[in-house]
Image: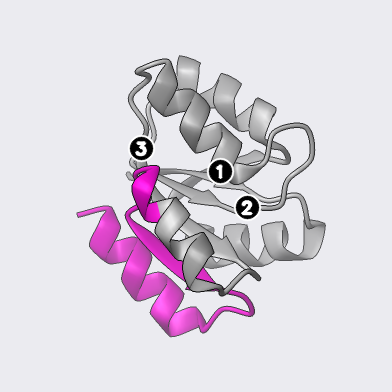
Amino acid sequence: MKKILIVEDNPTNMKLFADILEAKSYSVTKAYDGLEAYNEIKKNFFDLMILDIQLPILDGFSLLKKLKDEKIDCPQTLIVSAFAMDKDKQTAKALGCDNYITKPIDIMNFLATVERLTK
């Protein structure tokens, strides 16, 4: 069973993502801020991290930078964000993000991307 870490501070989005993934038999761990996600990644293996950019305590870009700077193995990363600017996508890519989807999500595209990244 593939393990996915969802890092999302919006309870509605968290529930949506978790429900979709659990219905497809993924094992889901939830983190509501970047620091919580950082601690989860340090102690557990994940096949994929679904990451929002705007997070309390430690934002998504800062989390990716911290993992990179500390040479901590980062899972495949799918950013799901309301930010759709090319600059944000370029920053994400430079920090090692594997894919980027804008909110609101298209569920079929979201699932296809998750499946592709967890193969």
**Considering depth in this image, is 115 or 8 the residue closer to the camera?**
8
Q: Farthest residue toward the front?
A: 87
Which comes sooner in the sequence, label 2 or label 3?
2
Name the residue carrying label 3.
Answer: 75
**Considering depth in this image, is 103 or 70 the residue closer to the camera?**
70
Question: What is the x, y in percent for residue 39?
Answer: 58, 20
Magenta stretch in the rendered image = 93-119
Q: Amino acid at mark 2?
A: Ile
Question: What is the x, y in percent for residue 21?
Answer: 49, 61
In what quadrant of the picture does the C terminus appear? bottom left
Name the residue carrying label 1.
Answer: 61
Q: Name the secondary structure under disc 1.
A: helix
Using the image, determine if residue 97 lies above or below residue 42: below
**Considering depth in this image, is 52 or 21 the residue closer to the camera?**
52
Q: Name the secondary structure under disc 2.
A: loop
Within 10 Å of disc 1 (Cα), the crowding (few <14, some 14-19, many 20+) is many
Residue at the image point whose x is 32% and y is 44% from the top: 1
Within 10 Å of disc 3 (Cα), the crowding (few <14, some 14-19, many 20+) is many
The residues bearing labels 2 and 3 have C-alpha atoms spaced at a distance of 16 Å
Name the residue carrying label 2.
Answer: 53
CB atoms at circles 1 and 2 under 8 Å apart? yes
Residue at the image point whose x is 41% and y is 60% from the top: 90
Question: What is the x, y in percent for residue 57?
Answer: 77, 32
Which comes sooner in the sequence, label 3 or label 1?
1
Residue at the image point whose x is 73% and y is 41% from the top: 32
Magenta-colored stretch includes residue 52: no
The residues bearing labels 1 and 2 have C-alpha atoms spaced at a distance of 6 Å
Viewer-nearest of discs 3 and 1 = 1
